[in-house]
Image (spheres, rainbow, N blue to C red):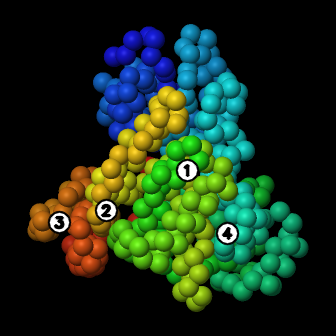
Amino acid sequence: MNTQDNPTILCLATYFKGEEFLRECARREWRVLLLTEEKLAAKPWPRESIEEVLLMPDLSREADVIHAVSYLVRSREIARIVPIDEFDMETAAALREHLRIPGMGQTTARHFRDKLAMRVRAHERGIAVPDFVPLFHHDTVREFMQRVPGPWLLKPRSSAATIGIHLLREADELWPLLEALGDRQSFHLLERFVPGDIFHVDSIVSERVTVFAVVSAYGQPPMSVSHEGGVFMTRTVERGGPEDVTLQAVTRELAGVLGMVRGVMHTEFIRGENDGRCYFLETAARVAGAHIADVVAAATGIDLWKEWARIETSSPASAYRLPDVRSGYAGSVISLARQEFPDTSTYDDPEIVWRLDKEHHAGLIVASSDPARVRSLLTSYARRFKEDFVAKLPPPEKPSA
């Protein structure tokens, strides 16, 4: 393990993830402290890379975390604080400001956690977003629903993925939901539902410059998969195509507009089927879930977890250099499975580079230099997955990872 003279990085983790981030920090001779929840103590964290695992009952209790870390720094000098997951961002930002540690502060963090804040900021700078309204003044909400035709989406402002989203087809559906939310209704927004194809851009920012970005397309909107069941699918879009060019440019603009200095971003857009226009949906200053980072690595050779760690531990910050990028293509198919241990051995194409090893889940990643081959394999596998594996559960009320 590293000597006492090496800098210390404190990583917050409400969920078990980011093992390669922790390993890379240790490889770069930083002392790694992991603050996680007691229920995750037995998870297979890379303990050979961690100097100490610190446990608390609940990392969402921000005041308790600030007290605990303030006690910790009486005997430890912490140079960086990093949230491994999106749900730790606000606490990490509060810790940085309280302890005056460099990194994203609370105001900027809201642009990457609060769907209302990021929409307002993007809209003010001329970036297209679906029509939206905050749920503050009810007469303003009524006027919005009269002016903007439905359907609409009721969204939590600070959730992730599709958790807590409601699709409303009639205006009268909103008010019982707001009544049930009570004092929590102001923590939501209402947005025009835009049907269309959804894309995501996974990028790396170093000293306010977007040094890497790869554009991918979902097979089905994640909300459809979450609420209706089916197969989750994503694939790299063709480089130099209209979506690639447009969405890379908008993502670079967003990084500046929202105040990203250094780190990783996962940004989602929708191309409206009625007008062909690309609308910004949301972004997060984190590595994407659903094994999207594995797809990015298969296509480009870039490990987003590893590069994020390299950026956080570069000294000076301007010393970071992106490795060589491979211009390949990759895609994934993932679904819940009826079987406890689904057998994917009959899927034997040479393009398969990864298989998901998780109970009641089936998943594959394919990679090729030919985007048409990737698209063809995914289409075939999605159809076969529905017959071989797919199970359906009610949409989750809270994230599981």
Q: Secondary structure at mark 4?
A: loop
Q: Amino acid at mark 2?
A: Ser
Residue that numbered label 4 is attached to? 127
Residue placed furthest toward the bottom: 274
Residue that numbered label 1 is attached to? 209
Residue 87 percent coordinates (x, y): 56, 45
Could you tell me how far apart the alpha carbons at marks 4 and 1 are, in whole angstroms? Answer: 19 Å
Residue drawn at (24%, 64%) of the image: 367
The crowding category of the residue bearing disc 1, from other C-alpha atoms within 10 Å (few below 14, some 14 to 19, many at least 20), is some
Could you tell me how far apart the alpha carbons at marks 3 and 4 are, in whole angstroms? Answer: 38 Å
Mark whose residue sits in front, 3 or 4: 4
Could you tell me how far apart the alpha carbons at marks 3 and 2 are, in whole angstroms? Answer: 16 Å
Res 361 quadrant in image: bottom left
Residue that numbered label 3 is attached to? 351
Q: Amino acid at mark 1?
A: Val
User: Which badge, 4 or 1, is on the more N-terminal residue?
Assistant: 4
User: Which badge, 2 or 1, is on the more N-terminal residue?
Assistant: 1
| Rendered image: mark on residue 327 | 2
Could you tell me how far apart the alpha carbons at marks 3 and 1 are, in whole angstroms? Answer: 33 Å
Residue drawn at (76%, 65%) of the image: 124
Res 218 quadrant in image: bottom left
Residue drawn at (47%, 35%) of the image: 319
Q: Amino acid at mark 3?
A: Glu
85 over 336 or under it: above or below: above
218 over 339 or under it: above or below: below
Q: Secondary structure at mark 2?
A: loop
Q: Secondary structure at mark 1?
A: strand
